[in-house]
Image: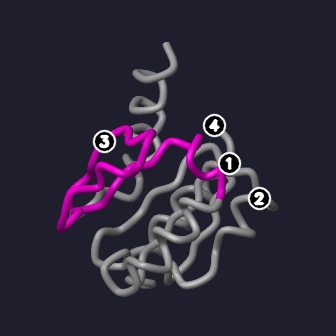
Amino acid sequence: MGLVLWIDHNTFATSLIERAFKKKSMPFYTLASVDDFAYLVEDLNPVLIVLDGETYEKNASAFIKQYEGSEKMQKLPFILLEPKRDFGFIKNKLGELNKPLEPFKLLDQLTAMLRDVYN
């Protein structure tokens, strides 16, 4: 699996997940907000974006503007963490995850979700 871009304002939980990925030498990049990140999608070339629903709610209009302005982002698969609303505008939604997450099982879960879509 390539780089996972994880967007979640909960930096403590995210740091645990990041450690689990790094322990398996898997590329992982985290952001705590959706305020200005579209350029990172272009630069980092993630294979998956995981978006926390609560983090999205903090600046939904900024996220939508960036999403609609990036063809690359629109082609990427998304997994949503506890979404609070309908994300029907996301063209490539793979699924949803609920908290609490098991950091050391998460990589296998994400890999299986990607595999299900691309096989």
The amino acid beneath tag 4 is: Met
Mark number for residue 42? 2
The amino acid beneath tag 2 is: Glu
Q: CA distance from mark 3 to mark 4?
A: 17 Å
Which one is in front, 78 or 72? 72
Residue visible at 61% across and 52% down in the picture: 73
Residue visible at 64% across and 74% down in the picture: 37
* View extreme (top): residue: 119
Q: Report the magenta residues as a range.
A: 70-98
Residue visible at 45% across and 57% down in the picture: 50
Mark 1 residue element: helix
Residue at which label 4 appears: 1
Q: Upstream in the sequence, badge 3 or badge 4?
A: 4
Q: Are the residues flagged by discs 2 and 4 in contact, CB closer than 8 Å?
A: no
The amino acid beneath tag 1 is: Lys
The quadrant of the image that shows the N terminus is top right
Residue 116 point in image, percent of width and height: 40, 21
Q: Upstream in the sequence, badge 2 or badge 3?
A: 2
Q: Are the residues flagged by discs 2 and 1 in contact, CB closer than 8 Å?
A: yes
- In the image, residue 97 lies in the stretch drawn in magenta: yes
